[in-house]
Image: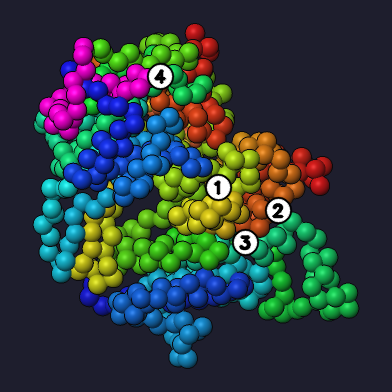
Amino acid sequence: MSTKKPRVAIHSITGCAGCQLTFYFIKDRLLDFLGAIDLVAAPMIKGKNDLDGKYDVCFVEGSVSSERDLEHLKKWREQSKILVALGTCATHANVQGIKNFREAKKVQEYVYGKEAKNMEGELKPVAPTPLDAHVKIDYKISGCPPEEVEILRFCKDYLMGLDPRIYNEPVCVECTKREIKCLLEDGKECMGPLIRGGCNALCPGVGHGCTGCHGPIPEGNIPQTITLLKANGIPLHLINQRMQKYAGLEFEKLGAAIKSEVESDE
Amino acid sequence: MGKLLKKSAANDFFRSLQKKGSLYAPVSTDMVRFQHIKTPEALRSIDFDGHAFFPPKKYLLPNEEELFTIKQGKLQDTNQSLPPQFVVNVRLCDLNAIAILDKLYLDPDYPDPYYKAKRDATTFIGINCKREIDEYCFCGSMDLQRAYDLLLDDRGEHYYIDVRSDKGMALVKELPDAPEQQDPTLPKTSKVLDQKDLHQFFADKWWEGDNELCVSCQRCTALCPTCFCFDVKDDMDLNLQDGKRLRTIDSCHSADFTTVAGDHTFRSSRLQRYRHRVMHKLQYYKDTFERSMCTGCGRCIRYCHSKIDFVKTINEDFK
Ligand code: SF4
Ligand code: SF4
């Protein structure tokens, strides 16, 4: 690696900004981190930002939910050597993505009332999608919000000149290592087998089933996990809601076969 | 050689171990777990009946262990001598599992120094099962050996302590000798794995049924007392001058585990990975070391989300 500090940007499109906030919450390490890089653009915390220059690494949080989001994203892609999708909105469209399973007009009416006019121009809504639906993404760090340790590990790997490794195992792995009593085995609800860990089984560790905030693992066995959840008395429409919330379109793709079953259950 | 330990004095014996080093034993709460028994008072919580969820391999192959540290860019000396530790009330399946791990990690040509340091510091003291713990145990068919230093065998008022090594004898020499040597009977189980040459059943079709039920959660490998695969990673500080190299337990059920440099994946489907685990446990290891790598502890079936039972599949379907 050259001795010149990498030019890093942290940008945001539609989301709650919680992912960025997690970045700034790497508390005791934040100053070390800022010392190791050149943070050239981070509009949430900086007054002066380089919005048009080249970036070595650009973190983007949020999902593409408007025409303007898409324009920004394309521009950042052009500017950046490495583009990182930060958080489950960026990797899976997350909560915004729920809209994809509803009638757009109804959603709009529900939020803005029947009288509201359609938004036009750059704020015109588009179906919320993850970043990789539009541009090439080099790394994905999911999580709602992502874990401090995962962000930090990514940065350290990058600074060392390594190809950063993203943890890719289901929640069950960390649960088992922590010797937590399995909630599924206990007849409860837990999305663990389908969801990417990295959280060190935070929720199961305090007796709460995983709701799926890290989004799905790449090859989850959806039909069998649904069988397991149903055996615990969890209704299909609830399982469906969980998956729509964090796994969004990927669930749609993977779970097409069960969709009709879900609808009849609702 | 046998020694006698009054049941009512079992805690005194364990107390004597506490004075020599750290004591670890099963404790039953919502599950049975091996735990550090720190105080004399805590001796009361030791469990004599249950089968621990996580096997005692964790005292030799922790989930995460530091191999070495680097300070200011320089390698630090790693202290390889550890204080003694005693792990008690270990079941015969898990004692045999330690013997299997020893074979791999203490190989005379390639001993693993990190494992060896822990192994040298650790004494495992067994307890005999008088009955099968539940319907998942099948150790009775897995050719278990009396592979231990000491084993407690319930004889009513007393435990008969079967002594198999000098290391064991040193811990019990104060106790009275048993009037006669009586080898503990090895546990019998109603569940039995039929021994078959699994090479004949490699084709996908034999594995498809179980594979459909597998969710790749890796509970089976994490909990298997003989699964030993690991990953190595560096954890540097942001100054890139200080840091450590870590070894963490890993699993053949993970797609990332079978992916190597250049992004080549040896076993790209879940079926291949599932099959590999069972084949390695029951066949590949045996091809080299003459015994199966499985000790019949039953954990991979008992704690599988889908209760996938390879014993049943092999017995009933592989023909
Ligand atoms: S415990 Fe069962 S479901 Fe989980 S990886 Fe093992 S075989 Fe598959
Ligand atoms: S393969 Fe299963 S039954 Fe055999 S030792 Fe491992 S966990 Fe126990």
Check the residue under mark 2 and report the chain it is in.
A
Give A138 or B53, whichever is nearer the viewer: B53
- As drawn, the label of residue B181 is none
Q: Chain of mark 1?
A: A
Q: Secondary structure at mark 3?
A: helix
| Real-space Cα separation, disc 4 to disc 2, in angstroms | 49 Å
Disc 3: host chain: A
From this view, report whether residue B255 is shown above or below residue A1: above
Residue occupied by mark 3: A94
Task: Read off the magenta span.
Answer: B151-180
**Amino acid marked by disc 3:** Asn
Q: Can residue B113 be found in the magenta stretch?
A: no
Picture disc at residue A192: 1
Distance between mark 3 and mark 4 Cα atoms: 53 Å
Q: Is label 3 in contact with label 1 (beta carbons under 8 Å)?
A: no
Residue A18 shows in the view: yes
Q: CA distance from mark 3 to mark 1?
A: 17 Å
* Residue furthest out toward the bottom: A47
Closer to the camera in the image, B77 or B7: B7
The mark nearer the N terminus, 3 or 2, is: 3
Asked if the residue at tag 2 contacts the one at tag 3, i.e. Cβ–Cβ closer than 8 Å, the answer is: no
Residue A83 quadrant? bottom left
Q: Residue at x 69, y 78 (%)?
A: A123
Quadrant of image for the N terminus of chain B: top left
